Image (cartoon, helix red, strand yellow):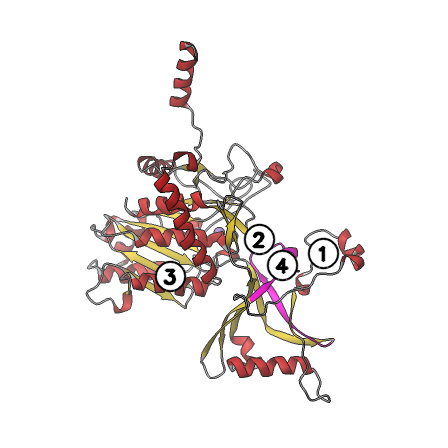
Amino acid sequence: MPTKKTKKTEQLREKLSREPSRVWDKLSDAEKDEVFRYAEGYRAFLNSGRTERRCVSEFVRLASAKGFVDLDSAGRKKNRLFRVLRGKLLIMAVPGRRPLTDGVRLITSHVDCPRLDLKPNPLYEDTDLALLKTHYYGGVKKYQWVARSLAVVGTVVLGDGRTVDVEIGLKDDEPIFTIPDLLPHFARKQMEKKANEFIPAENLNAVFGGLPYPDKDATDRVKLAVLELLNSRYGITEEDFTSAELQFVPAEPARDSGVDRSLIAGYGQDDRVCAYTSFTGIMEATRPEYAAIAVFYDKEEIGSEGNTGAQSRYLEMFLMDLMELTGTPPTTHNLNKVLMRGKAISADVNAAFDPTYADVFEKRNACRMGYGVTIEKYTGHGGKYMASDAHAEYAGWIRGLFNKHGILWQTGGFGKVDEGGGGTVAKYLAKTGMDIIDVGPPLLGMHSPVEVTAKEDVWMCHRAFAVFFGS
Ligand code: MN
Ligand code: MN
């Protein structure tokens, strides 16, 4: 029996201090079932969306089936809208009961992921093997991409303007590709090098074929045979590689992980986990008070550059068109109102505390697997350089919203000060004047070919985004 004194202490502690809660401890049996059911859809999405283009087309397919229409052909059906830019940037919108100039509820995520792109002139033959030269995209540890199964996926624009989609290595009966590593027997010098040097970028060459063209007098017979095969199957010539976007991605599918199946292990969860959870969030939005807008950006992993990245002006153009469609004069003055009164979430993953590498984390502020979504007030590095630092008022509003709706959340950070660091699209959106804060699930193994999420965090993320769109 606790004494009266300890009971009072406990009450005080409960009242004044905060400990994050394990999501699993707070769920009903029905909700636990829902966590696992939701993960099925998420895992299926990871496996169909291996590139930014595929993510966008998959979202468009799913959204169209539920009544979303292209903004440009909306006509009188204006209640569920989307628009795609260049196959890679998707914006979805559900207009609210209030006019857009009262502000919007906007969630951004990104659908591009670290990978190996093919170079514009990738195919060559050396010592009777056909090989493809690659150029890594985003922050990768290059050694993680050798000695593993890879699939090649993407789009080729042919000389006559036709577009061909290529996807080899994702199905069980298809061939896969690999970048062979040096055998340990010969690797004495390699093993003495630093980890960022022992696989030079120019060594990321994938074996693509091995059989020669029948004419024994020909040169580069394997390359010729590969070209002939590609031409007969896809109509591709060597020059077509210069107008192609082909990527090597991990071939193996995302799968349940852990003996209790509590986790999902697979490629591309930064940031397709937030893309999927914000997508399912906006799919649930019906006549919200404020317009719900979900933006799925490209190019985040290389600095949000280009016309499909978050530094582009496309969101503003979209909002102007949305204003016109929903009866608000699309003036710059009105656009500024939409943006300045907007509330936004930069939905991106956070680095989960990894006990094996405890020394790089600041434990009191790092997020933990299974404790719900993270709220990260600021990103950046060093003295908060390059940070988007959400205002206390807005952080308070988000916290209050989540608390009111039973969303389990924790704080997130990006490693020890002066050691870690990172950023999201938040700082680019903040330039428009809107309030924005980072929210997303904890992730283990970020940017590796096998990233890991906890299913209850993924589900909590979905709920948090649905609540936000409805706020
Ligand atoms: Mn990310
Ligand atoms: Mn990333």
Counting other residues with Cα less than 10 Å from the Cα at mark 4, is it few (<14), some (14-19), or many (20 or more)?
many
Q: Which residue is mark 4?
A: 145
Q: Pointer 2: what residue?
A: 448
Residue 435 visible within the image: no
Determine the CA span between mark 1 and mark 4.
12 Å
Does the magenta segment cover residue 150? yes
Label 1 sits on residue: 198
- Nearer the viewer's eye, disc 1 or disc 2? 2
Q: Position of residue 410 (x, y in %)?
A: 44, 36
In magenta, the rendered stretch is 128-151
Alpha carbons under labels 3 and 2: distance apart: 24 Å
Up-down relation of residue 215 to residue 331 (above or below): below
Residue at the location (39% across, 34% down)? 26
- State how far apart marks 4 and 2 are (Cα): 9 Å
Q: CA distance from mark 3 to mark 1?
A: 39 Å
Q: Magenta span has 389?
A: no
Amino acid type shown at disc 1: Phe
Q: Which residue is mark 3?
A: 59
Image quarter hosting the N terminus: top left
Quick one: label 4 or label 3, which is nearer the N terminus?
Answer: 3
Considering depth in this image, is 351 or 389 the residue closer to the camera? 351
Label 3's element? helix
Establish if 272 lies above or below 351.
below
Residue farthest top in this picture:
4
Give the left or right position of residue 211, taking residue 301 as reference. Answer: right
Mark 1 vs 2, N-terminal side: 1
